[in-house]
Image (spheres, coloured by chain):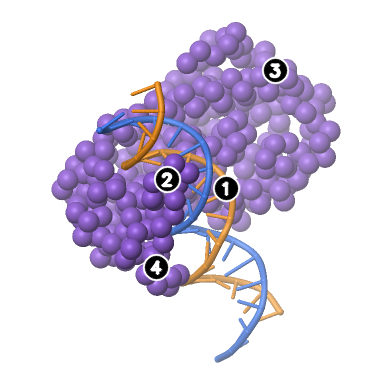
Chain colours: A purple, B blue, C orange
Amino acid sequence: MVRSEEKTKVTKQNNGNTVGLGVGMKKGPWTPEEDQKLLSYIQQFGHGSWRSLPPKAGLKRCGKSCRLRWTNYLRPDIKRGKFTLEEERTIIQLHALLGNRWSTIAAHLPRRTDNEIKNHWNSHIKKRMTKMGIDPMTHKPNNGTQNLGSNLNHMAQWEAARLEAEARLVQKPKIKSTQLTYVNVSPPSIQKTPTKVPPPYLPCLDVLKVWQGNLWSNYSINNESLQSFISTSNVSVATPAIPLSNQVESNGSCDQGPTTEHNDQTETQIGPFEEIRYTNDENFINDNLLRSPDFWEEFVVPDGGWNSLANNFAMICTPPASPVF
DNA sequence: AACGCACGCAACCGCATTTCT
DNA sequence: TAGAAATGCGGTTGCGTGCGT
């Protein structure tokens, strides 16, 4: 990939400071040598100030470029590869609540970067939803005749605020860890097995779960649709980390992650979306149905339409008067 | 085999926000 | 407290690749 030769460019921020590329700064794809330099430096010293890192690490890159390379590619705790069905569904649901707040969404998808999620949304999910006749921005059917009830909208706003607050909490430790020294980490090209990292904070997606559970309970499942989808999808199939039956507790709260015992776990579970196959196939099927294009194509809004869904939703989950964070 | 097109994704850009002095 | 600097975020670009013709 030879996007550009070495270029020089200096841009001005609105407050006047120079950012971007200074004289002799390199642009374009990173070479393995550059990756190695950046990695070695961060392993030894942590990244500290990104601005001052490049010369210290022997790189002719701007700090911004180094930070991006580290956060989107070199970081040892990044999960790469295909998105699981569970991850995709979570993205869709969070997007419905939060819009294009990719970093907030990423905070709820352990080991995925905001850039990766954004790319996946734009290149896969968005198109699929459009094809299914769903507006990817409003998450409503394109015909516009079916509206979610105001209760649900209110809940969505409330939950969006809560999720953002959670995301901020998740991100706080990152700031404190800027001086963290990483040991024995390698870029994906060098080391296939990621170094173990401390488990991230597992968010509690209360409303999402209620929402999910309600959807499943309202619509019958067509196994053929599901099988057809799985067999044709290029999305890797993973089972829900939180089986639906466990998702909604009687008091409306939820647990912090999977507590159900499961077999055939093939890798260390760090986040809730590892590819773990539950032995409970019923949960597996139910939870992945929504991902099936066939399901959506054959989807018929039941009697009462979206409003009935919203009403059921409101019955199950009564929010506090107002969110306070 | 050659060409064109669509797709996927890494990386850049500019603005916003946060932190520092 | 204000201005500067650093960092974060979301939108966009453009190259490599795979596939169909």
Q: Which mark is residue A223?
A: none
Point out the frontmost of discs 1 and 2: 2
Point out the frontmost of discs 3 and 2: 2
Mark 2 highlights which residue?
A: A16
Q: Are marks 1 and 2 in contact (CB under 8 Å)?
A: no
Mark 3 highlights which residue?
A: A151
* Residue at screen point 74% across, 26% down: A148
Q: Name the subunit of mark 1.
A: A
Q: Are marks 1 and 4 on the same chain?
A: yes
Mark 4 highlights which residue?
A: A7
Point out the frontmost of discs 2 and 4: 2
Residue A47 in sight in this render:
yes
In the depicted structure, whether residue A12 falls above or below residue A271:
below
Dot 1 amino acid type = Trp
Dot 3 amino acid type = Asn
Instruction: Count residues near mark 3 (Cα–Cα under 10 Å), then give few for <14, some for 14-19, many for 20+.
Output: some
Q: Which mark is residue A121?
A: 1
Q: Earlier in the sequence, mark 3 or mark 1?
A: 1
